[in-house]
Image (spheres, rainbow, N blue to C red):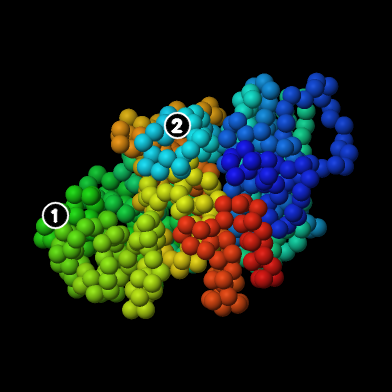
Amino acid sequence: MNRWEFIKASTFLGCSTAVLGADSISCSKRTQTKPADTGTQPKNYRISTASGAVKIMPEDILPESDTVTFGIAGNETECFQIVIRPETTVERVSVTVNDLVSGSNRISGHTWHQVGYVYISTFAGHPVPADVSGKLSGWYPDPLLTRDHAHLIENWSNSIWVTVHVPAGTPAGTYQGTVELEIGPHTETIHIEATIYGFSIPAVPSLPSLFSLALEYLAKVYPGLPTAIRKNWLDFLAERRIMPTDLYIDLQGPDGAYRITPEEYVHYNGQTNGFVIYPITVTWEDRNAPAEVLIQRFEENRGYIDAIIASGAAAGGKGVFYGFDENEPEHFDTMKAVHAHIKSRYPDIPIATTSMHIQSLAQLEALHVDILVLHITDGIYNNPFADQLRAAGKKVWGYISLQPYHPMPNWRIENALIETRVLLSAMAYHERFDGFLYWGVNQYNKGQWETPRPISRNTPLKLDMSITTPTEEYKWLHGDGLLIYPGTDGPLSSIRMENIRKGLEEYEYYKLVEAKLGKNATLELAAQVAQSMSAYTRDVQEYLKHKASLAAKLG
């Protein structure tokens, strides 16, 4: 099915007839008579609604709709889009997101952002041309921008991104709410119907993760990294079930001044699961350093390490030592020596590494590695090998980087958003990931190797910031290692980042079902939407119906 066929077929891009109720996010055009609009001028725009799991391109023309329905658990977020396509530019649209109400129960604090755009100049040189077939240079949706009022570009499908958060323990039931839009002389109402399920997902994620926050780049964007801005960044990640941690920080370099403190790790432990106590290697070149040099540097940082361990933040395996990123066989002797030294000091703290060349349990044990992080590309992560390691008490995580390519999932700019949600929920469960790693959320070395300027409130929707890797070899690579944009007062999310949060939240549905039905039965359920790394649903409607079926089993 090509893109245009998908748009016409999907009821989640704004629909005129189908309403699926609380089974998922869905949308419809209401048929009942609405109060007469006070505007006397003719309307020169169309309004649609869409799931947050769908990427809306500027040229996409959606069926009209004014209703959104979805189901959601306690302690979960849900996102949907209101898509406005005007015939002329509209400078100012007032957006008001009202409370969700059911009897005396009320859910407040919903937010809205406007989807902004980044310019993609080329996909030429992409290693898998089929991945980008039909994709042209132009403006692609990604950043979520803060604005006082929405701004509408003429003959574009402009998306207003609404985020609903349901607190843990919210009483179950059907809640009604609205989003009101003032477009010129006209007032439009989007109707929301949310079914709140009778359960909450846990505050602490069941799936450990390591997403690296480069403190070095934060300090470049925000000179001196003011305390309030730094806290906004750390809070932002924790709210998305990710511990703020830097996998590659040089504790003895300038960025060491901004290190995450033991007290901060303790503070965020109630929302997250996983962080790096100490990076054994800081740079790619460190892998080739003599073992003696790496051991000496480790000893020089023992004070920081001991303070973290003494704080209790690392208890239960939450804190790890990480290093020798994507090591080669020529690094194994150094790894043995350095890891043996670390184990002599901290025998109970896990050592993790990413590798494509560790191929046996004997190798893993000789290298003193407890957590092997395997790339999900090209069959490197495979369950027979992973299960052999797990049977011996090891952990096996998954990770992605610029790879993999189709048909496996990724969150480069060209990938469908639904891939992200499936990867971190049904696929992570079905493939039995013990955790997940991603190398960077704010690698601000794109474009011409320039440090970007902070993005101000009410900035133009067409963002003056590149997310393209700045080399001729990788000119086709957009969004790798960059999921969060730098705002004036702190982070600005992206539609990709919000779908990462959704995937991590939806993983919890499988863990809750497992507690009720058992592991084998839950694996069979996960296989309904993710049979393997390369066979999984890309149909938003199917995925959300499946999620609703899981909720029904928990009811």
Say whether residue 71 is left or right of residue 119.
Answer: right
State the image coordinates of residue 528 (x, y, percent, origin top left).
59, 64
> For the point 63% across and 61% down, which residue is it?
547
In the image, what residue type sits under mark 2? Answer: Ile
- Residue position marked by numbered label 2 in the rendering: 120
- Residue 289: image tag: 1
Q: Nearer the viewer, residue 331 or 105?
A: 331
Mark 2 surroundings within 10 Å by alpha-carbon count, few (fewer than 14), some (14 through 19), many (20 or more): many
Which of label 2 and label 1 is nearer to you? 2
Q: Quadrant of the C terminus?
A: bottom right
Q: Are marks 2 and 1 in contact (CB under 8 Å)?
A: no
In the image, what residue type sits under mark 1? Answer: Ala
> For the point 67% across and 46% down, which residue is it?
10
> For the point 54% across and 34% down, which residue is it?
116
Mark 1 surroundings within 10 Å by alpha-carbon count, few (fewer than 14), some (14 through 19), many (20 or more): few
Residue 518 placement: quadrant: bottom right
Q: Nearer the viewer, residue 122 or 31?
A: 122
> For the point 77% across and 32% down, which residue is it?
187
Q: Give the mark nearer the N terminus: 2 vs 1.
A: 2
Residue 185 placement: quadrant: top right
SS class of the residue under badge 1?
loop
Say whether residue 466 is left or right of residue 178.
Answer: left
State the image coordinates of residue 466 (x, y, percent, origin top left).
41, 32
Count of number-bearing discs: 2
State the image coordinates of residue 270 (x, y, percent, origin top left).
48, 64
SS class of the residue under badge 2?
strand
